[in-house]
Amino acid sequence: DGMVKHQVLGPLAHLLGWLPAWARPRYWRRVEEARRLYAGTAEAIVGRIRCGGEASGPVVSSFCATLSRATWSVEEVVDEVVGLLLAGHETSSNTACWALHLLATSQPQQERCRAEVDRAFESAEAKSEAAGTSSSPTRLSLGELEASCPLLLGCVYEALRLFPTVPTTPHIAPRGAQLHGLPIPEGCPVSPNKVALGLDPNLFSHPYAFDPERYARGEHGPHGAALATFGAGPRICVGLRLAETELCALLALLLRRFEIEPAGPAPREWCAVTNSPRQSGLSLRLVPREWGKG
């Protein structure tokens, strides 16, 4: 619980913890209600798995069930699962919004990405036909998409660079920490400024331009390391590959089936815990592609 509150509420966590429920802002009350719901569900799954009770297929194979079979305590399992749920659902959906906005307002880049996706699907279908087996575009693995569609992954990381979903990720300095030789006091909060990093011309040429080729050129580094997009080291985001899979799959299928156009004013950034177009909204027009194109 403490880890989740620290990640979600940041420096307000301790202050809000002292306030009675009725005095807390409505948003934070809803966060707390969601956390309790997730935690209760996770505790129930852990109990069913560890007691050898009956559980359905999806529950048995779930991330929570997998952790339940480890030597962790119930509290550790619940903390990890709830943290993944709270940190993962809104970050991925907001990143998808920004990526779609960039594609909609950059038609040449959208066409190049779509052509790349079409080639990947058509190649998979041709291999399947040659082998005499059925195939579907949705069965392309993330590895196959990454290998054949570097621009697609580039779109994801350009969205994370230009509109960082989590602009700062605070950490607490351990004893003996240093930054370029400068000692950092133990317990001092330290956080990278991902907005400044993403627009640094020393790291990214023409930093304000949407250029999906940056990822293939190595400007982002592995999994966005240049921006610490998913963190690094032993504390790197546990949902990194899940996020890449969700976003690549969504963008690939939408590009395959639709032409994406803006249908309203440009969205405005609004940041509480995550950076989203929540207040302005994001209006897009999905135009079905002509028969035979997708």
Image: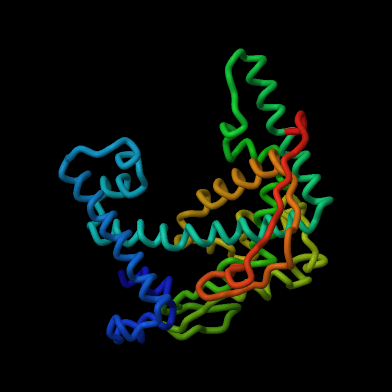
Percent across and percent down for residue 126 are 69, 21
Decide if residue 220 is in sight here.
Answer: no
Residue in the foreground of this view, choosing between 109 and 231: 109
Name the residue furthest left.
51
Image quarter hosting the C terminus:
top right
How is colour applied across the structure in the image?
Answer: rainbow
Query: Which residue is drawn at the image coordinates 80% and 56% (left, top)?
Result: 106
Q: Residue at x 70, y 53 (%)?
A: 155
Left or right, residue 43 beside residue 203: left
Counting labels gives 0
* Image location (x, y in percent) of residue 46: 24, 50
Relative vertical location of residue 53 with respect to residue 196 in this rendering, above or below: above
Say if 258 sits above or below 5 in the image.
above
Q: Is 280 above or below relative to 106?
A: below
Image spot of residue 108 (x, y percent): 84, 50
Q: Is residue 114 left or right of residue 221?
A: right
